[in-house]
Each structure stands twice: as C-alpha cells, then as structure tokens.
Image: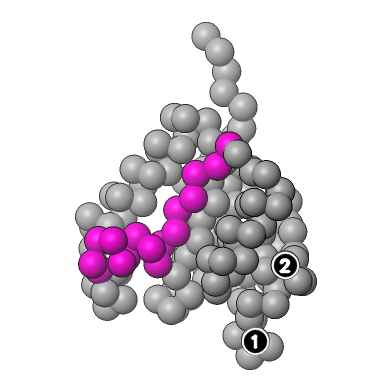
Amino acid sequence: MQQLKPLNFFLVLCKTRKKFDKYIKINKIRNKYIIDIKKMMDEEDISASEIHQSDLFKILILKKFNLAKDKNKDIYYIPNFNVIKQYNKLFNIKDILSTSHNFNLLYFYEDFEKSQQPTEILEKISDFDITQILKDY
C-alpha cells in the first residue's frame, strides 16, 4: 500500500482574497484545496450570528478537509475575520491535523492595520512548521 505524503495545511491571514489569488498565480501553486470561510458563508447563506451554532456548516468544513486529505492536496484555509472573536480557536485545527501533517502560516502583513494585527496568532508563531510573512504582494 502506498503511503501518502504529509499534508500541508496553511492558515492564510489575508483580508482580501485578491492578494491571495495573486500569490497562487505568481507561485504557480497547483496541488491546492482552498477553504474560504467567507465565501462558504455566502454560498450557504449563513449569517455571522448563526455560524457558531451551525453544525451543518462545521460538517461542511470537515468534509472539505477530508476531501483534500483523500486527494492528497495542500489546504489553504482562509478564516472570516469579521466573525472570529478569538484567534485561539483556529489552533483547534492543529489538533485535527495530528502530528503527521504540517501546520503552516501564510500571513499577508499589509492587509491588516496596526490596530487589527492578529497578535494572538503571532504570539504562537513557534507552533507553526513553516511561516511566511509577506509584506507587499
């Protein structure tokens, strides 16, 4: 039986999807699976107040994770920063990935104003396997 290579999970910190799409295009990233929470909320017509109670939405996200793992594709996870109250909840994803997969950070620095920097995540930068901080893209 063929052993699958470790999955690369990227927590993508960007406010505008346009910059991330440009990053994907310039770097010619092919083996990817993008989970954009804001886009999923729009597609499923789920409001910010409903997202925390919606088990269906959580199942959809987990299904996308498993689909990416089955296809052996890297996951680029883009949270919705308008909904997140605590960034620490994003680290629950690391538990789902277990130790056999990589937990990486892709951070678009220019997207955040000084007052809106996700300091909770930046304080835990050592928890990531690979970190890329992009100043201008």
- Give x and y (percent) for residue 125: 71, 63
Residue 45 among magenta residues: yes
Mark 1 or mark 2: name the one nearer the start of the chain: 1
Q: Identify the residue position indicated by label 1 in the image.
A: 113
- The magenta segment: 31-46
Residue for point 43% across, 79% down: 82
Query: Callout 2: 10 Å neighbours few (<14), some, many (20+)?
Result: few
Residue 30 among magenta residues: no
Q: Residue furthest top?
A: 1
| Mark toward the viewer: 1 or 2 | 2
For the residue marked with disc 2, what is the amino acid? Tyr
Disc 1 to disc 2, how far (Cα)? 16 Å
Q: Nearer the viewer, residue 11 or 26?
A: 26
Q: Identify the residue position indicated by label 2 in the image.
A: 137
Question: For the residue labelled by badge 2, is the local secondary structure a helix, a strand or a loop?
Answer: loop
Contact between labelled residues 2 and 1, with CB atoms less than 8 Å apart: no
Query: Looking at the rendered structure, which numbered label has been put on residue 132?
Result: none
Question: For the residue labelled by badge 1, is the local secondary structure a helix, a strand or a loop?
Answer: loop
